[in-house]
Image (tube, rainbow, N blue to C red):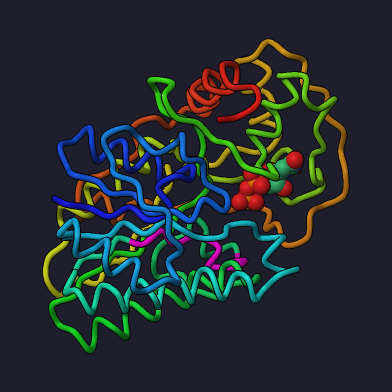
Amino acid sequence: MRVLVTGGAGYIGSHAAKRLLDSGHQVVVVDNLFRGHRQAVPPGAPFVQADLRDTSAIEKTLRQHDIECVMHFAALAYVGESVLQPLDYFENNAGGSASLLRAMDHVGVRKLVFSSTCATYGEPPPPEIPIAETCPQSPINPYGWSKLFVERMMRDYARSNDKFCFAALRYFNVAGCAVDGSLGEDHHPETHLIPVLLNVALGKLPGAVIFGDDYPTPDGTCIRDYLHVEDLADAHITVMESLNKGDQRFYNLGTGNGASVHQVVEAVRAVTGHPIPVEIGPRREGDPPMLYANPRKIKDELGWEAQRKDIKQMVADAWRWFEKHPNGY
Ligand code: UDP
């Protein structure tokens, strides 16, 4: 298929673009390079530097490359930043997506695979965990809302155009780097647990802070469902290849297993051989104690399940890239 990957210079988008190429699809990448890296765009994918809000640039790209499907990753994705700068999130994530849909509508591109998030569920009550797609969506920050708005937009647009089909993939925590070492994770600023711990191992930070160890979990630290970025990329391709006219699909993407912050720290110690000094700090606002997916729906319907479930393996794949690229791309 001829696929436009928005945000294909970013962490997840670049991995998806590479897996698409590896599996025989044709890929065009569009990215505004606000936080993406030109070097992350895999060779073999033509690159267009444009912002999604530039509807005519997107329309031109869709036409020029005769695009059949869009995989839409481009977004701002920091929860804390979204609280401080909500309008940026609504303009970029919701506004950018509306513009993309408009361009697709003008050109007649009818397939969309959208990068959504488990942040659309907010803080589900304990009986809802593990989280299934039927869990009520009630975001607790503008980032989650901006993604939920896009889900809503796609549903409403689909009602007006019966040829349009889409899938919203609600990711849990994404981890790891390309197994062949060709692509990595390079965020500025970096706030995610595994890269922060790897920066400690590289000597770029003296130590890490664990945000609270008094949660109602077995070791007191928060539990998250870490999914390997290569598994995530494969899930996108499986979903894209299965989408048919009129489909409206929603899938939670995770392993179904949780790892606590302490367990992740231990995995990083084991993989890097570095002692990784940590101190216990206060809780970070908006961190639910436990979030992990019930991944049964996508397995039952499409046969996809995560293949690389071991947190140590994910850390090892990330470490390979971080060691070779201590200063990022
Ligand atoms: N975390 C931590 N110290 C850090 C970064 C993260 O203790 O320096 C914790 C955070 O509170 C959460 C988990 O690690 O419980 C995963 O956080 P991350 O920011 O990686 O992803 P999130 O779950 O917020 O999407």
**Split into 4 quadrants, where in the image is the C terminus?**
top right
The percent coordinates of residue 186 (x first, y second) are 58, 36
Residue sitting nearer the eye, 255 or 203: 203
Left/right placement of residue 263 relative to residue 136 reads right
For the point 87% across and 49% down, which residue is it?
A: 282
Residue 24: image location, x then y, percent: 15, 37
**Per the image, is 180 magenta?**
no
Confirm whether residue 221 shows in the render. no
Q: Residue 115 in magenta? A: yes
Please tell me whether residue 276 is drawn above or below residue 215 in the rendered image. above
Q: Position of residue 222 (x, y in %)?
A: 69, 46
Residue 262 seen in the figure: yes
Name the residue: 45% across, 58% down.
74
Which of the pair 140/163 is nearer the observer? 163
Report which quarter residue 284 is drawn in. bottom right
Q: Position of residue 279 (x, y in %)?
A: 87, 33
**Which residue occupies the extreme top position in the image?**
273
Q: What's the residue at 59%, 67% (across, down)?
A: 143
Q: Is residue 208 left or right of residue 326?
A: right
Residue 215 lies, with reference to residue 137, above or below; the image says above
Q: Nearer the viewer, residue 213 or 126?
A: 213
- Asked whether, in this view, residue 137 is left or right of residue 97, the answer is right
Say above or below: 269 vs 264.
above
Magenta region: 114-125
